[in-house]
Amino acid sequence: MSKLSEEDIEKKLLRFPDWEYFDNAIHAEFEFENFKDCFSAMSRIAFECEALNHHPDWSNTYNILTIALSTHDAKGVTDKDFKLAEAIEMIVEPEED
């Protein structure tokens, strides 16, 4: 899988308003009502990651899930990252402000 250009990444991000590109990865942060809901979403995302054989750099603090996607073999963002971001978006419903 080949690394996408910064221009291609920015174009693809138009479909992902919750995501940003920096530090050679696409990043998102999602807020949930509580820890249990956050952990539940992480568990569902984990199944998608296994199915795609692609795993995020992520962390959670109480009700906040922080995700960074980059394809390590390609040393940057690829279509594989956007495919996983799309799967994550289908699972995660961020809290509206």
Image (cartoon, helix red, strand yellow):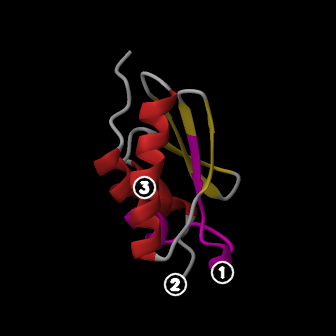
Q: Which residue is mark 2?
A: 1
Q: Secondary structure at mark 2?
A: loop
Snapshot quadrant of residue 72: bottom right
Q: Pointer 1: residues within 10 angstroms few (<14), some, or many (20+)?
A: few
Residue 34: percent from the left, percent from the top? 47, 23
Residue 12: percent from the left, percent from the top? 39, 57
| Badge nearest the viewer, 2 or 3 | 3
Q: Quadrant of the C terminus?
A: top left
Seen at 42% across and 21% down, the residue is 33
| Badge nearest the viewer, 1 or 3 | 3
Query: Nearer the N terminus, badge 1 or badge 2?
Result: 2
Q: Is residue 54 above or below residue 15?
A: below
Callouts 1 and 3 close, C-beta under 8 Å: no
Q: CA distance from mark 2 to mark 3?
A: 22 Å
Q: Nearer the viewer, residue 21 or 82?
A: 82
Residue 42: percent from the left, percent from the top? 48, 48
Seen at 38% across and 31% down, the residue is 94
Please state which amino acid type lies under the numbered disc 2.
Met
Query: Nearer the N terminus, badge 1 or badge 3?
Result: 3
Callouts 1 and 2 close, C-beta under 8 Å: yes
Q: Nearer the viewer, residue 76 or 49?
A: 49
Q: Which residue is mark 1?
A: 73
Q: Magenta residues, as a range?
A: 66-83
Residue 17's label in the rendered image is none
Q: CA distance from mark 1 to mark 2?
A: 8 Å
Q: Secondary structure at mark 3?
A: helix
In the current view of this chain or complex, which residue is farthest to the left?
90
Q: Which residue is mark 3?
A: 45
Query: Nearer the N terminus, badge 2 or badge 3?
Result: 2
Q: Is residue 65 above or below residue 22?
A: above
Please state which amino acid type lies under the numbered disc 3.
Ile
